[in-house]
Image (cartoon, rainbow, N blue to C red):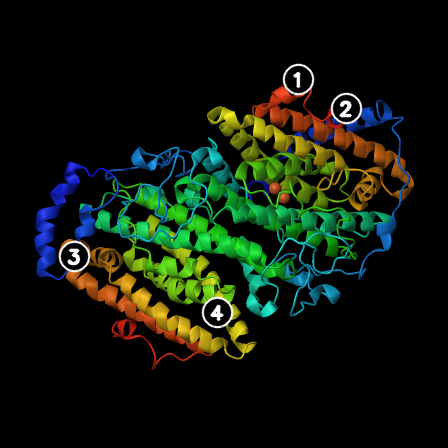
Amino acid sequence: MTISKEELDLAPAVREFGEDNNLDLSWLDTRGEWGVRAEPSKRGLTLGDIQLGSYGEPGDHSDNMTGRPRGARARNDAYRVGGYKIRSKADIWLSNAHVLYEESLQRQWSSATDVPWNTIKPLPDDIERAQCQLATFLTEVEFVAAEVPGRWLAATTPDYFEPRMFLISQVMDESRHLDVFRKRAFANGGGLMQRPNVTTSGTVGSIDLSNDFTEMSSRLHITGEGSVLTIFRMGELMAYNEAEKTIYRLAAQDEARHVAFGVMHLRYLAETEPERKEEIHCYLDEGEGALVAGNQNPASRDTAQSEALAILLGGGEKNFDEGYRKLMAVRKRQAREYVQRVRSAGFGERFENGRANQELLAYTR
Amino acid sequence: MTNKDNEPQDSARVRSRRRVNQRLRDAVSKETSGDLKDVEIPPKKLDWMKRTYQWGVKADVTDSGLTIGALNVGIYGEIPDRWDDQSRMPRGAYPMPGVPPIGYSISEKRDLWADNAADLYEEAIQRRWTPATDIPWEAIGPLPDDVEAAVCQLCTMLCQHANTEIETLGTWLHQMSYGYHEVKLFLATEMFDAARHFEVFRKRALSNGGGLGLELKGDVKRMIIESRGGWSETALLLYLLRGLFTFTIYRYGSILANNDAEKAIFEKSVQDKARHLSYGLEHLRYAITRQDDKDLVFNNLLGIGERLVARECKEPIVLEPLAVIFGGGVEGAQSGMRTAQRLMSDYVNLYLSSLRSIGIDRSDSLSNDLKSYLL
Ligand SMILES: [Fe+2]
Ligand SMILES: [Fe+2]
């Protein structure tokens, strides 16, 4: 860390004063870069605005094991207690994590007061049960997304704090999603129903167990949340009141940020470490298989939640067939949006070279 | 604060949303009557329709909206002392057999619970703020170099306090069983608050011609991060030893602040910190009343912890910057140090009274180093 000349000029008089007054004061001239003056932009003083000088973008590798803030002056006697596993930038970085984080702060909402709960009126029993079944499913899977990103926080050097901050905002968002769907289950004379009858976690290749951040992100942000985002965006088709519409709309806003994080991270990795692309394709192979089998995809077939969705989309059990056809329309959209995202992330070749899951591709046609 | 996208919507926005939704409906019905007309429809099972432990539950919407605490009705409000399920089954949901375990290590209520967690969660959301736009950054004007350097050094330390909190919560949160979701939800808000504190003090340090200072050696961080025995023990160190110190500094914000921006930063941060402490104390009290020797365990840990806190406070970068700010510059640092001593005395007193409130009396066993700060 360099110290500017002006800084050193502070020292002699101060040192003398310190000695006279039993003060050390050496910290006045032992510090990080001096003379930094970030200016607020039109969105206030953002994380982007303070990326200046040595406080700007971090290096490709981090040797920060003590947890000091990026750009602070390091000392030799500090304890190396960080134990950070992620110290290579490409493992977690993306170009705009700070923008997504700032956006998340601006768009926080309250499930207690921003949802017009009083617009929920008694619904036919089959609809209410379907709604509660879907809510039960979402209460569970939203928490995969609330828990897993959190595990990577303490494992990542604070030199890469921008993606870390974003992941914290995601933990917050997903906590609210868990909470809002639990609230929906109890808002209208229903209750919780059956927990998912398919395995969402605890098996190899699942979001929970990934040992590599990008593997986790490809499953969580791209395939998992991507498919949930499509459904939330189509919430209008399965909402029976303003409250439900609001829930889906606000949750979709949040999910769009989470998915964007995953896409941008994959893109960064593809650009900076193309030698990892083949490995990432393997994760995508698995992810596509899961999308089709649908463990975490509420729009998959033959599950409690897919039947519930068909009832909601059709307008009741008596219109199940029509609802099921709409569910297939949702799936087609999921598949198309997935392809778009993977292309945008820089892995589109799998759709040209025959590698992509054919069953999934059939949905895009 | 209101959500920008949730304010009374102007008609243009509503109209455009309606148009988008209409297009969506049209596209879907075109598909269902076209390509999907002859799609094979599997026989429906609908076996889930009767699978519920309790049906007919309606939570009350109050003046504070529909809160997470209000959902604890009927069987859904039964919060058992032990949660054996090792998956993410929502509390009160109808279980299904054969779900592989995830591996939660904290499954006893006494090891994480606090009755106030649900309310604190909703309060955190209602009181959210944004460093970028809720702080009047333009109110920061040039300061003498020594004062600016002291503010920046203080900010560097407070960033580290926040970072330790983030890493600690990140380590523990996923070990906590899902049956106690109220606590997990609250701790998510605490982590989000800590991220904001990390952010706001960094922003302050980089916005007025200064820059970050020197890192702490890390005695207290090491103690908190390396505490692995249980969440209650970690919480004791995180909230009582470190948390109360951070809180006391924030509370001195009105005299520390050189301008309205800094004042706002401390005012907002102290509100957040008060919530964290409120959970922490409530949980520690709960833990003590449910385990015979917990107070002895805590006393032992505090005896060591107090010495580490005192050692860290002897580092010049901890109290000297406060003294320089209080004194209005290096020349006033001597008198400023008296205010810093008062801050330390307040911290130690608050520490002792907080401990008393959870049933621990350390007035006789307080470590000499900390005792020496009492005025
Ligand atoms: Fe979500
Ligand atoms: Fe999400």
Which chain letter matches label 3? A
Residue A72 location, x and y as percent? 30, 44
Q: CA distance from mark 2 to mark 4?
A: 57 Å
In which quarter of the view is residue B77 placed? bottom right
Query: Relative to residue B255, is residue B24 depicted above or below?
Result: above
Please name whichever residue, B12 or A162, is drawn nearer the observer in this view of the structure.
Answer: A162
* Mark sitting on residue A352: 1
Which numbered disc, 1 or 3, marks the residue that appears first in the sequence? Answer: 3
**Are the residues under marks 2 and 4 on the same chain?**
no
* Mark sitting on residue A24: 3
Numbered marks: total: 4
Residues at marks 4 and 1 touching, judged by CB atoms closer than 8 Å: no
Which numbered disc, 2 or 1, marks the residue that appears first in the sequence? Answer: 1
Query: From this viewpoint, is residue B144 visible?
Result: no
Identified by mark 3, the residue type is: Asp
Residue B134 location, x and y as percent? 43, 46
Write the residue at 40% across / 75% down.
B353
Write the residue at 49% across / 28% down.
A268
In which quarter of the view is residue A258 placed? top right
Residues at marks 2 and 1 touching, judged by CB atoms closer than 8 Å: no
Q: What secondary structure is found at the residue carrying circle 1?
A: loop
Identified by mark 1, the residue type is: Glu
Write the residue at 23% across / 43% down.
B142
Q: Quadrant of ligand 1?
A: top right
Question: Disc 4 designates what residue?
Answer: B281
